[in-house]
Image: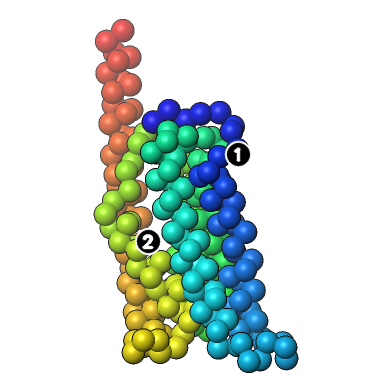
Amino acid sequence: MEINDLEIDNLPNRLTFFRMLMIPVVVSALYFGQHTPVALTDYKHWLGHVACWIFVVASITDFLDGYIARKRNIVTVFGSFLDPIADKFLVVSSLIMLLALDRVHPIVVIVLVLREMYMTSLRLLALTEGVDVPVSSMGKWKTGTQMVATPMLMIYDNFLGMNLPLIGTVLIYISALLSMWSALLYSLSMIKKLQEKRAEKRRVKKSH
């Protein structure tokens, strides 16, 4: 798909901006849920729900902005740059807050955050080298389990008969394992693509 110029004011970018604006709201709801001011004491139980559902809405906008951009062919350089950053900010901020609230193990947070940094670097290298490495199904499962586990750990209570702390903890561990496996698969696939590209360059050079 052709990427347009630095156009900013379009619907996908507005959704991305909205997602970024929701990050401090999620962080504040989680923080005040643990350190509740006197005026909010009666609402302490619901602040986790507020963080949860805002996170869910923000995550839905991640799907919508990409879908609309592709559907209307309004993919822009600015949006391609900002969209993944907004995703990383939302996920990493939420994980750090859950760590501060002692709802997720530090090793899990380290694995997930470092994996995001590693994958961002790999994708930048792939872009620089001009190779296209598609996201594996394992990576999609990792994202799915993480996006389900995170809001559950934000509520961190029984809800509709479900033990959300237990379910969320199990899913976040699964997400950490999938993140490492998918990163390995992506790395191997990228190495193969780079080797093929360089081999092709050598063949072209020899033919001349």
Give the class, few, some or many, for how many residues have Cα within 10 Å of label 2's Cα (few <14, many ≥20). some
**Is 123 on the left or on the right of 133, as rendered?**
right
Q: How many marks?
A: 2
Marks 2 and 1 sit apart, C-alpha to C-alpha, by 28 Å
Pick the front one: 108 or 194: 108
Identify the residue at horizontal 65%, vertical 81% (top origin): 32
**Is 138 on the left or on the right of 68, as rendered?**
left
* Image vertical order of residue 10 relative to residue 179, above or below: above
* Image vertical order of residue 87 relative to residue 52, above or below: above
**Is 189 on the left or on the right of 89, as rendered?**
left
Is any part of residue 38 visible from this angle? Answer: yes
Pick the front one: 205 or 185: 185
Q: Quadrant of residue 167?
A: bottom left
Viewport quadrant of the C terminus: top left
Give the labeled residue for mark 2. 143
Mark 2 vs mark 1: give the one in front: 1
Q: Are marks 2 and 1 in contact (CB under 8 Å)?
A: no
Viewport quadrant of the N terminus: top left
Identify the residue at horizontal 33%, vertical 21% (top origin): 201
Identify the residue at horizontal 45%, vertical 74% (top origin): 151
Give the labeled residue for mark 1. 9
**Is 27 on the left or on the right of 156, as rendered?**
right
Is any part of residue 129 visible from this angle? Answer: no
Label 1: state its secondary structure. loop
Give the class, few, some or many, for how many residues have Cα within 10 Å of label 1's Cα (few <14, many ≥20). few
The kind of residue tagged 2 is Thr
Residue 132, position as x, y percentages in the image: 35, 36
The kind of residue tagged 1 is Asp
Residue 55, position as x, y percentages in the image: 50, 67
Counting residues from the start of the chain, the first of labels 2 and 1 encountered is: 1
Q: Quadrant of residue 108?
A: bottom left
Pick the front one: 85 or 200: 85
